[in-house]
Amino acid sequence: MNEQECELCGAAYEDGCAECGMPLCADCMDDDGLCPACASDKAREEAEGEA
């Protein structure tokens, strides 16, 4: 089995970003299972949708 590391901090990989699949540990993943880049994209899309 291939041991992956979190793309952001190098800790043990827990899961991938729900959007882009970037390997992330639980600490770097947000509550929706997204990496920071996808989380900010999602937040921006939601803000634009409400405007």
Image: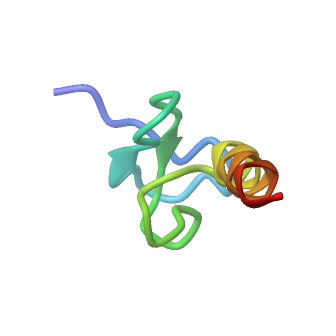
Report x, y in % for residue 23: 47, 39
| Point 61% across, 52% down: residue | 10
| Point 72% across, 45% down: residue | 45
Q: Which of the 4 image quarters holds residue 38?
A: top right
Residue situated furthest front in the rendering: 51
Identify the image quadrant of the C terminus: bottom right
| Point 71% across, 50% down: residue | 49
Residue 16 is left or right of residue 43, and the answer is left
| Point 60% across, 50% down: residue | 35
- Up the image or down, 32 lies above or below 18; here it is below
Residue 2 is left or right of residue 49, and the answer is left
Report x, y in % for residue 8: 69, 50
Identify the image quadrant of the N terminus: top left
Report x, y in % for residue 18: 40, 41
Foreground pick, 29 / 12: 29
Report x, y in % for residue 21: 45, 30
- Up the image or down, 30 lies above or below 11; here it is below
Residue 14 is left or right of residue 7, and the answer is left
Residue situated furthest left in the rendering: 1
Foreground pick, 21 / 41: 41
- Up the image or down, 22 lies above or below 17; here it is above
Give the colour scheme of this rendering. Answer: rainbow
